[in-house]
Image (cartoon, helix red, strand yellow):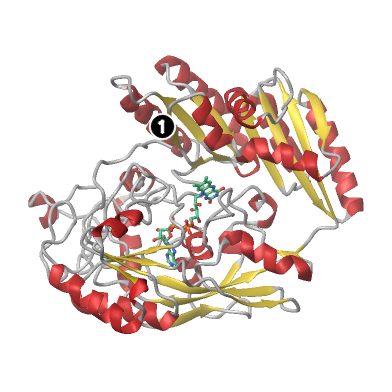
Amino acid sequence: MSGTHGTETSAGPVLGDTPPEATSATGETGDNSAGIAAVGRVARTLMPDTGVIEDPTQLRTYECDGLAHYRVTPALVVLPETTEQLAGVVRACAEHGVPFVARGSGTGLSGGALPRADGVLVVTSRMRAIREVRRADQRAVLEPGVINLDVTRAATPEGYYYAPDPSSQQICSIGGNLAENSGGAHCLKYGFTSNHVLGTELVTPQGDVVQLGGMAPDAPGYDLLGTVVGSEGTLGVATTATVRLVRLPEEVRTLLVGFHSTDDAGAATSAIIGSGVLPAAIEMMDALAIEAAEAAVHCNYPDGAGAVLVIELDGPSAEVQHEYDVVERLCQEHGSFELRLAIDATERALIWKGRKSAFAAVGRISPDYIVQDGVIPRTALPEVLRAIAELSSSSGVRVANVFHAGDGNLHPLVLFDDAKAGAGEAAEKVSGAILDLCISHGGAITGEHGVGVDKAAYMPKMFTDDDLDTMQLVRCAFDPAGIANPGKVFPTPRLCGEVPGKRKHAHPLVEAGLADAF
Ligand SMILES: Cc1cc2nc3c(=O)[nH]c(=O)nc-3n(C[C@H](O)[C@H](O)[C@H](O)COP(=O)(O)OP(=O)(O)OC[C@H]3O[C@@H](n4cnc5c(N)ncnc54)[C@H](O)[C@@H]3O)c2cc1C
C-alpha cells in the first residue's frame, strides 16, 4: 500500500491546556524526556520488563499503522496486561503532561494509531482474554486486544457469532474496532460496531477507570458510550467491550452477479433495498478491480463484466428462498447477464476471495495506489461513480472501485506510479476530489476507516467552525489536558479554555504561526 492524501505532518499539535513542556509548531512538545522517563519508571513498577519498550530499534516496530505513509517513532511503548497497569501508565502520563496514543493491532488506515515522538504508545495486544460468552444474554465480554474473528470462533460452538466483520478481521482488535466504529461487508444488515457494543470499561485521560453501558440496554442519562464509540482514541482507552452476539443463520446463499456497467449494478442495488429485501451484504467491484482480482487470485468472475455484485442472503431458509427470487428478478430487470449461486462452501469462499483480496490485488496492476474511503447515500451511487470515471479520464489517473454498495461506502483505489514525476500529486488530487464528490452528494469523508491524521484537514469541508467547536467541547470534557491521541481527527489545536463560536480575531496560536485556521 502506498501513500495517501493529506498533510505531510506526522502528527498535529497538542490540544488542550499546554502541558508542562512548551508546544512546538509541529505539535511535538519540546524536550519532555524527563516526563517520558518518569512514565517509564512508573510503567516498570507496574509490569514486567518485557512490557516496557525503550530500545530505539524495538520502538521502530511501532512507528506506523496500516497507513505506512506516515511514520513516527514513539518515545516509549508499554504493553499492559491488565486494566490496572494500563490505568497506572495513563495516570502517570496525566501527571507528567505526556501525550499517549492507544494502539490495538495497528491495522488502521487513517493513521489513528500513529505514535507521538514525545509520547507513549499504549498497546493492548497483551489484553486478549475473552472474559465471558453469555449465551442466554447473547453477549460477550472482551478485552480490547481480542482479535475480531476470535469472538466468532468463541461464540460459534454456542450457535452465535459477532457480526461486524471488517476485511481485516483476522488481525484487527476489538478495541480498534470500537474506536473506529468499524464496518464490514455484513454491516449492511446487522449494523456497524456501534450497534453491537453495549458497554465498555474506559480508562479516562486522567487514568480513572469508568464503566459506560453494560449488559443491560439503554442506560439513563447522556449516551456517553455512543460518544466514545468511534472517537478514535481521543477520549480514553477502552479496556473491555461488552458486545452483542448474533444467532448463526439457518441458511446462507452467496450470489455473484455480472453486469455490463456500474450504472446497472448500482441501480440493481437500490432496487433490491427498495423492495424491502435486506441482504446481509451487497458488495460491488468494477472492471478494473475485477481485472486486478483475477490477476491475483483467479476468482473466475464473469467474463467481460463492467461490474459484479456479490450478494449474500441469510436467515431462515424459507425467507432466504423468497429473497433469492426477488433478488434474481431485480438483477435481471436491471441488466444482469449472469447470476451464479455458490453451490457449496468452496464456491462461496472463491466468490468472497475475489472481493476480499481486491485491495492487495490492485498491486498487480499498479505499483502504487491510494485506498480512499468515503460514503454517499446509496441512491447517489450511479451518479458519483460516473463522476469518478470522468475525473479519472480527464486526469489520466486510473481509479478502481471496490466497495460496500449496500451501504454506499466507497473505496476507490487511485492508481499511480510514484517513480513518475508528479504522479503521486496527481493521484492525491483525484483522491481529494472524490471526497469532495462524496460531500457534495450528501455523504461524508469517511465511511469506516476514520479521520485519524489522514483526513483531519478535510473536517472543515464537512463541518462549520461552530460544529468543530462543539466537538472540541466534548473532547475537552473528557480530556481537558489534551493528552489522549492529540493531533488526530481535528485539523488545528483548540484550547479547552477557548470560548467556542465565531471569533472576532485570529486565535493567538494562529497569529503566532503555531496553528492553521479552519
Ligand atoms: C487490509 C485491510 C482491510 C480493512 N478493512 C476494513 C473494513 O472492511 N472495515 C473497516 O471498518 N476497517 C477496515 N480496515 C481498517 C482497520 O482494520 C480498522 O479500522 C480496525 O478497526 C482497526 O483496528 P486495530 O486494532 O488495528 O486498531 P489500530 O489501528 O491499532 O487503532 C485504530 C484507532 O483506534 C484507537 N484505539 C485502538 N485501540 C483502542 C482502545 N483500546 N481504546 C481506545 N482507542 C483505541 C487508536 O488510537 C487509533 O486511533 C482495514 C484495514 C486493512 C489493513
Quadrant into which the N terminus falls? top left
- Using the image, determine if residue 378 lies above or below residue 477: above
* Residue 13 in the image, given as x and y percentages of width and height: 21, 56
Q: Kindly tell me whether mark 1's CB lies below 8 Å from ligand 1.
A: no
Number of marks in the image? Answer: 1
Identify the residue shown where x is 27% and y is 59%: 74
Please tell me in which quadrant of the rendered image residue 469 appears. Answer: bottom left
Please tell me in which quadrant of the rendered image residue 57 appears. Answer: bottom left
Residue 41 or residue 228, whichever sits in front: 41
- Using the image, determine if residue 365 lies above or below residue 435: above
Identify the residue shown where x is 88% and y is 51%: 319
Residue ranking furthest to the left? 512
Identify the residue shown where x is 47% and y is 37%: 438
* Residue 373 in the image, given as x and y percentages of width and height: 48, 41
- Residue 283 visible: no
- Residue 296 visible: yes
- Using the image, determine if residue 42 lies above or below residue 275: below
Query: Mark 1: few, some, or many residues within 10 Å (few <14, many ≥20)?
Result: many
Residue 314 or residue 79, whichever sits in front: 79
Q: Which residue is mark 1?
A: 431
Q: Name the kind of residue labelled 1 in the image.
A: Ser
* Residue 517 in the image, given as x and y percentages of width and height: 20, 47
Identify the residue shown where x is 77% and y is 68%: 157
* Residue 16 in the image, given as x and y percentages of width and height: 22, 66
